[in-house]
Image (cartoon, rainbow, N blue to C red):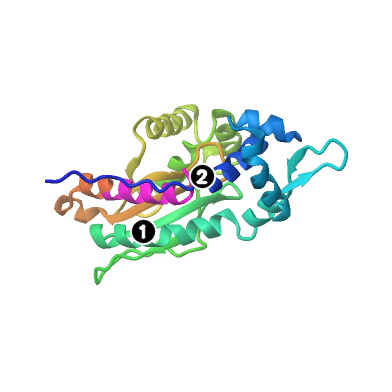
Amino acid sequence: MAETTKVKYNAPALDKGLDIIEFLSKEGIPLSQVEIAQGINKTPSEIYRMLVCLEQRGYLIRGSNAGKYRLSLKMYSLSHTHTPFDELKRVAHYPMQALSEKTRQSCHLSIMNNDQLLIISQMRSPNAVSLSIEEGTHFPLSMTTSGRVLLSMFSNEKRKNILARDVYFKKWNKTEQQSLFNSINKVTEIGYRSAKSKLTSGITDIAVPIGLNNSELTAVLAVSIFSSSLEELDINKILDELKIAQQKINQFIGG
């Protein structure tokens, strides 16, 4: 079998422009043409046209006195034309559709909203009989498989602060609370969670994290299965398809 060669297309001018924007963003202070050039390992003459173009397009602002460049708010404005979760729903559509078709199971995408799990997108199974978890539905984080996966993406401090406001968690004894923390740590260790639903009998959920840890863009992709069907299904194959969809969505959002 012939080897597949990955073709890389070079765009030097675009690379320079992006290098400039990323460097100024990282430094966070106005910089001169020489300082920027040194920072991205270019000569001042190499980046002159890039600086002029970026300034004309409104991405950079140059000070009237020292002539130093800084980022404008244009990138911020563009990034907030749509909310991150609008974009997440858009890019997740086809990976979720492929996941549902390959596993013959329903899947759903959820985020945290007001300390609860919020379903923002679902894809129903192509089978005649399927599970449906309606978009816009809220569930407690502590009582759901997806909620525990979502909590695994936060720092210990943030996790504890969220759970301190959870109505179920507050009623549990220390052993039950520690069991929850153990299950969250297990997700961190193995990268997914599979468990029977604590809210709906006869349902098993398998969930994986989506997005970047400790960032604003965190979500969970989950497949819901009738527990009675587990003997006929290969859970490992479903998990493999979940991870494929996870990887595709993360690539689309820059994870």
User: Going by the image, does 22 lie left or right of 148?
Assistant: right
Figure check: 42 above or below 16: above
The outermost residue toward the bottom is 128
The outermost residue toward the left is 1
In percent of width and height, residue 87 lies at 52, 58
Number of the front mark, 1 or 2: 2
First-in-chain label (1 vs 2):
2
Judging by the rendered image, the residue that carries numbered circle 2 is 12
Q: Is residue 120 visible?
A: no
Q: Judge by depth and name the residue closer to the eye, 80 or 56.
A: 56
User: Going by the image, does 194 lie left or right of 2?
Assistant: right
Q: Which residues are magenta?
A: 241-255
In percent of width and height, residue 154 lies at 53, 35
Q: Quadrant of residue 167?
A: top right
Figure check: 137 above or below 248: below
Q: Judge by depth and name the residue closer to the eye, 105 or 81.
A: 81
Judging by the rendered image, the residue that carries numbered circle 1 is 96
Q: Quadrant of residue 187?
A: top left
Q: Is residue 162 visible?
A: yes
